[in-house]
Image: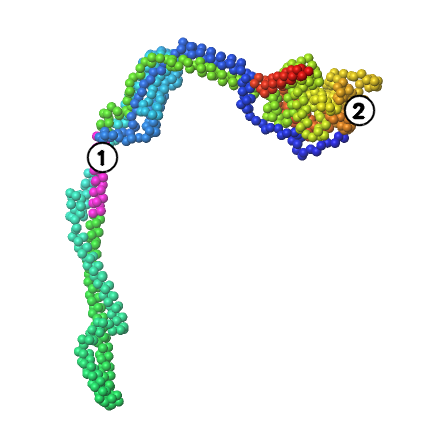
Amino acid sequence: MVEESPRASNRMAGLVGPRPPAAAALTPKEALGILRRHILLIIALTLLGLMIGSAGWWLIRKFYPRYTAGTLIQVLSPIETDPMTIGGIQLQKDILYGHRMLIAALIKQQSTLQELLARDKVKQTDWFRRQGGSIREAFKELNRHFVAYAPRDGEFVEIRMTCRSDTESALIVNEMLELFLAQRGTTERREVTDRLARLEEQRAKIEGELSATERALREVRESSGITDLDLSTGRYFQHTITLRLNSLELQKNELDLAIRQFAADIKNLEQLAIGPITEQIEYAIERDPVMLTLAQQLAFQEASLSGRLTKFGENHRDVRQTRELIDEIRRRRELRKTEIAEQTTRANLENARDGLLVLKERADQLETLRLEAETKKRKLDLARVQYEQRIKIRDERIAMLDSIKEQIGKWKIIHDDPETPKVLPVGRAPVPLEMVFSRQWYFCPPLGTILGLLLGVGLTFLVELANDLVRTPSDVARFLHIPLLGVIPDESEDNQVRGIELCHAVRQAPYSVISESYRRCRTNLKLSGAAESLKALLVSSGSAGDGNTSVAVNLATTFVATDKKVLLIDANFRRPSFQALFPKVESDDLEAEQFDFGLSNLLMNQCGAKEAVRSSGVEGLDVIYSGPLPANPAELLGSPRMGELLKGQRKNYDYIIVDGPPVLLVSDAKVLAGAVDATILVFNAAATSRGAAQRTIREFKEVDAKIVGCVLFAVRAMKGGYFHEQFKSYRRYQKKARKLARAQA
């Protein structure tokens, strides 16, 4: 078995080489290339659009003339202004614009258009006759071509009509102007009349309510006896009951204050009776005759004691007697002092209590009188409240009556005002002098040209995008997401390969563009992985005829040109091609000439590797024919014998290239992909669709095949594309190189 290289756990690990670019959108350069490739189609459709636009303009003027007549209607403010004042309320522009839009909608409403069609002058027009005399058809036509438009700025509504006749378009507009103004006048004045009638009803009702209120006032005055009212001003004077109640309440408040004062004095006197002697008692004691006498005696005795102490000494009998007499006088003074304090306190307390009883009796009498006065005052206040309520109702009714009378006068003025309909005619619509777009004759040809150009560009991109072939490297990057090893031009792009078998282009036309493309493919292949890991390569495609055999042979030739030894194996049992590409070479080995062994013979053990390998006629390049078609090709290719063959030949050759069958037709290629080091896919730019290419990649991924990249085969240089310039540059480069080589020779 051939030793396999390690694989990643997921299938995407089978893609080797540089990371493919992400799918990109259509670039401006690609779009420009598409336009350049289809420039003739775009020019043809543009000229066709120009001719159609010019012819259309001429036909319109000849067979379908259009005239538009119009006029303006001035729209006044929707707010009813006061005719008695100068100026009015300034409304916002949005509100005024909304009112103009409403007027335009009223003009275009179905009922208004039907009334216009019912007018005799409109029915007698050729425009109405062209509608077959049908109101329904005429309404549809009128609804399409009659316009009522309210511009945002300004105070007008524009009405216009477009038809084939200039006079009839003006006639229809003027008929609509008269009809709408008459409708608005009738409607607005009917509303004013209805409002006046409602105001008259309200005035009669309020006058009745005012009379009832006056009667109620009279009844209140008579029943309550209110006499302190000034009827001229409605103001009240102070009633005697009110004055008396106020006086009684004042007296009661003063009496309550005196009672509280007496109660407080009694409490103070009660406390003084058991407390120390106050200043008042001290004053009474000082004025008491007994106390004065005792004070004089005390003073005398104290003077006498002082003289005796000086004369007789401290212990003399007279001194002691004098001292005892002084103590007795002092004791009598204290007893008298206490007696006076008790008498004074008791007398004050009794006087205060007697005064409190008198005040309370007076308070009870005042409370009785106050309650009587308060009851009378309450009845008087209730009567006054009722009276005031009726006065307020009367004043409200009088104000309402005055306001209604004022409104009646204003609405009568508004009813006779010519601006009451809120719309005024600016003037009648004149007969149009020119057809619609008569001065813009240059409009249709450019429009047709632009439409033709757009159609050509759109058709160009539609044709390009509808082509799902894999034609360019950008298609490979955008849709396939695998590395691109090389781009092989179509044989029609290279004059040097004409008449040459494409499988031998590298050997027979080494200076051609195709040969250089294969050499570039070889270089990219070497750079896509380690040299020792890419020795056995499978070249396969999705369908037959995609060019995988040409790629395999030319790629092997490029390796041989670098002094590498290459073995080329034809593994396509169903459509072998190597016998025609590499005819037999004369050999001294009679057994080899007698038996034409190939890969199938080798895998069925009918011969050895030496007997199957043949010289291709190119030094360093050997081939193995496919051999006879076996009954079980897939089983043979997947047998251990195939792995042993590849493993054994690795020692003898630098590269082993296997030309495999198409994977979408047979399963042989999927079996071979597991035995080689890497797989190269070939996509034909003229035949391989994107879906087929994606299925091809998916088939190999299902068996974890190691896809080293792809080769885009038979690529045509499209005008405006990258390869068109590249091929031209390469030819100029080669031409200069050959001239230089001849000059050096």
Instruction: Check disc 2 and report its element: helix, strand or loop.
Output: helix
Question: Of 126 and 721, which appears nearest the observer?
Answer: 721
Find disc 1 in the rendering and name its residue: 403
Q: Residues within 10 Å of mark 2 (few under 14, many from 20)?
A: some
Q: Is residue 505 left or right of residue 160?
A: right
Q: Position of residue 312 (x, y in %)?
A: 23, 89
Among the 4 quarters of the image, the one containing residue 109: top left
Above/below status of 342 relative to 742: below
Q: Secondary structure at mark 1?
A: helix
In this view, the mark in front (1 or 2): 2
Q: Quadrant of the C terminus?
A: top right
| Direction from residue 594 to residue 550 in the image, left or right | left
Give the extent of the magenta segment. Answer: 384-410
Q: Which residue occupies 49% across, 14% down?
A: 46
| Residue at the outermost top position | 62
Residue 167 seen anywhere in this rendered image of the structure: yes
Residue 68 within the segment the image draws in magenta: no
219 vs 159, nearest the viewer? 159
Query: For the residues marked 1 and 2, what is the alpha-carbon distance in whole angstroms?
Result: 127 Å
What residue occupies the far front of the structure in this picture? Answer: 744
Q: Position of residue 177 (x, y in %)?
A: 31, 19
| Residue annotated with mark 2 | 609
Image point 20% across, 81% down: which residue?
299
Residue 137 picture location, percent across and down: 39, 16
Q: Is residue 486 left or right of residue 339?
A: right
- Using residue 467 as the reference point, say whether residue 185 is left or right of it: left
Look at 18% across and 46% down and name the residue there. 235
Query: Which tag, 1 or 2, sits closer to the chain's start?
Result: 1
The residue closer to the viewer here, 124 or 501, is: 501
Percent of width and height locating residue 686:
63, 18
Q: Which mark is residue 382?
A: none
The residue type indicated by label 2 comes to Ala
